[in-house]
Amino acid sequence: MSVTPMSFFTLFLLLLLPFTATSSIHNLLQSQGLPAGLFPDSVKSYNYDQTGLLEVHLDQPCLAKFETRVYFNSVIRANLSFGGLKGLEGLSQEELFLWLPVKDIIVNDPSSGLILFDIGVAHKQLSLSLFEDPPVCKPQGVLLEKNGRKQMGFQVQR
C-alpha cells in the first residue's frame, strides 16, 4: 500500500480530530476515559500536545472539595493517556491535616465506579460519582463573614 500526501494528510486529520474538536478540558477528559469533573469550572485554558503532555491553566490557585479538600495550583501538568493522568504536578489533597501531592489519577475499570488517587504514601479509591461535574473552586484565603466579623478562611462549595 502506498501512502500519498493526500492520504497521509487525511489520516493526520482523523487522528487529530478528537483533540481539536473538544470544546473544553472536560470533554477532553471524557474522550480519554476520565470523568469530566477532575478539573474545576474555572479553567482558563489548556494545552495538550502529541506526546500526551497536558497543561491546564487556572486564573489563580484555588481550593475545591471532592471527598476531602484539594488544592489546585494555577498551572497543573500531567501526562494524559486513556484512563489516567500520570506524573501530576500542581494538585494536592488534604489527608489528616496534611497536604499531600497527588501523583496519579487512574480509572482502571469504569464499570467499577471507582477512581484511584495516588498520593505517594497511599492509594485512595473514590467514587467516580464525585467527579461527574467540575467542582467550584474558590481562591485561597477568601474572607468569610461569621457572626458579623470578617475572618480569613476557605469557602469551598461543590
Image (cartoon, rainbow, N blue to C red):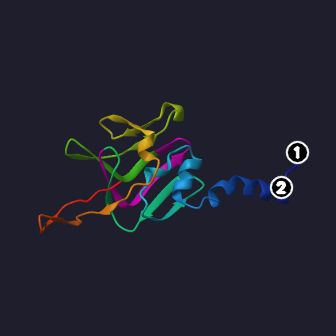
Label annotation for residue 7: 2
Tag 2's secondary structure? helix
Q: Earlier in the sequence, mark 2 or mark 1?
A: 1
Q: Amino acid at mark 1?
A: Met
Q: Which residues are magenta?
A: 68-85
Q: Amino acid at mark 2?
A: Ser
Dot 2: few (<14), some (14–19), or many (≥20) neighbours within 10 Å? few
Q: Is residue 73 above or below residue 38?
A: below
Which one is in front, 40 or 74? 40
Residue at 52%, 55% (x, y): give it: 26
What percent of the width, then of the height, locates residue 18?
Answer: 66, 54
What percent of the width, then of the height, locates residue 105?
Answer: 43, 42
What percent of the width, then of the height, locates residue 55?
Answer: 47, 59
Position of 50 with respect to 130 (left or right) is: right
For residue 149, what is the image quadrant?
Answer: bottom left
Tag 1's secondary structure? loop
Residue at 47%, 34% (x, y): give it: 113
The verdict on residue 69 being magenta is yes
Residue, disc 1: 1
Return the residue found at the far top.
Answer: 112
The verdict on residue 33 being magenta is no
Q: Quadrant of the N terminus?
A: top right
Q: Is residue 126 above or below residue 94?
A: above
Position of 76 with respect to 101 (left or right) is: right
Position of 44 with respect to 157 (left or right) is: right
Residue at 14%, 65% (x, y): give it: 151
Spatial CA distance of label 2 from label 1 is 11 Å
Residue at 56%, 53% (x, y): give it: 28
